[in-house]
Amino acid sequence: MANDGKPVAARRGMLGLLGAAAAAAPAAAIDPNGNRGDLPNRPESEAEKRRPRYRETDHVRAFYRTNRS
Amino acid sequence: MARLVFLCDSERCIECNACVTACKNEHEVPWGINRRRVVTINDGRPGERSISMACMHCTDAPCAAVCPVSCFYGTEDQLVLHDKDLCIGCGYCFYACPFGAPQYPRVGNFGGRGRMDKCTYCAGGPQQDNTPSEYVQYGSNRIAEGKLPLCAEMCSTKALLAGDQAIIADIYRERVQKRGFGSGAWGWRTAYRTTLEV
């Protein structure tokens, strides 16, 4: 198995894929310097910025309920 | 109108750091920054207590008071958010914050520190909700999805509470009445100018 080279090459291919995934991952993370990169600027208006964001959904009510016990 | 708060019940916190990990993972916070951290007092001695700490979204926030470019703004439900497009990285907010919440990710040439990063209460920032631009600058926006901050939702001992102040105070009061003691709502006097009567 070790002599024909094919399984070794397959394993190395997998490692290459993992490396590519690791290199791509930081692109999705928060930019350390707070920039947007090439992403479009989609600012909220002054009223949108300050609007109330909280909604008491079923999800939120379930959180409150489970914390009471 | 709801007033959103955090409350850490230090009688329940076991310093597992799940809140810290959940936050870092949810928002993909870069190396060197923690939006939330766990502080332990009297470590290894009788009376040891741990407190999970992040931006408390203060009433009359000192970070906003000292910011020279007014990059902080308050929402109607009293979250203190910041605009990274305005921030100049001067560091005043870091010194003003009683909880040490604002963090500076990098030190570059001539001491430039990029833009401050802090807890957003999982509510994003001044970009349109749940857009890639919002995510890359501020992290995920769970509040827009009708959820609460992941740190509180992940807490296995239910030590960290988040939500409407009136309901959170009720939950804490019920706990103290049941178990007969409590360390108080840590940070509430400083952050919200109120204490929790039990």
Image (cartoon, rainbow, N blue to C red):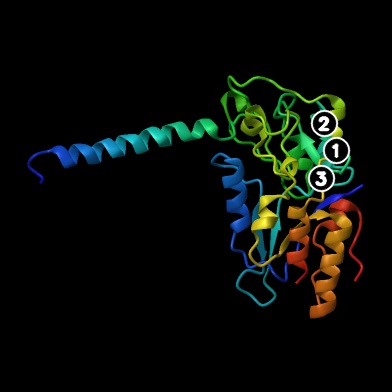
According to the picture, the residue beneath numbered tag 2 turns out to be A49
Mark with earlier residue (2, 3): 2
Which of the 4 image quadrants contains residue B195?
bottom right
Q: Position of residue B12 (x, y in %)?
A: 70, 70
Which of the 4 image quadrants contains residue B139?
top right
Tag 2, which secondary structure? Answer: helix
Answer yes or no: is residue B7 visible: no
Asked if residue B68 is positioned above or below residue B49 in the image, the reply reads above
Q: Label 1 sits on what residue type?
A: Thr
Quick check: do tags 3 and 1 share a chain?
Answer: no
Q: Alpha-carbon neighbours of circle 3 within 10 Å: few (<14), some, or many (≥20)? A: many
Q: Position of residue B51 (x, y in %)?
A: 70, 61
Quick check: do tags 2 and 3 share a chain?
Answer: yes
> Could you tell me which residue is drawn at 72 percent across and 45 percent down?
B101
Q: Nearer the viewer, mark 2 or mark 3?
A: 3
According to the picture, the residue beneath numbered tag 3 turns out to be A54
Answer yes or no: is residue B79 visible: yes
Asked if residue B43 is positioned above or below residue B122 in the image, the reply reads below
According to the picture, the residue beneath numbered tag 1 turns out to be B75
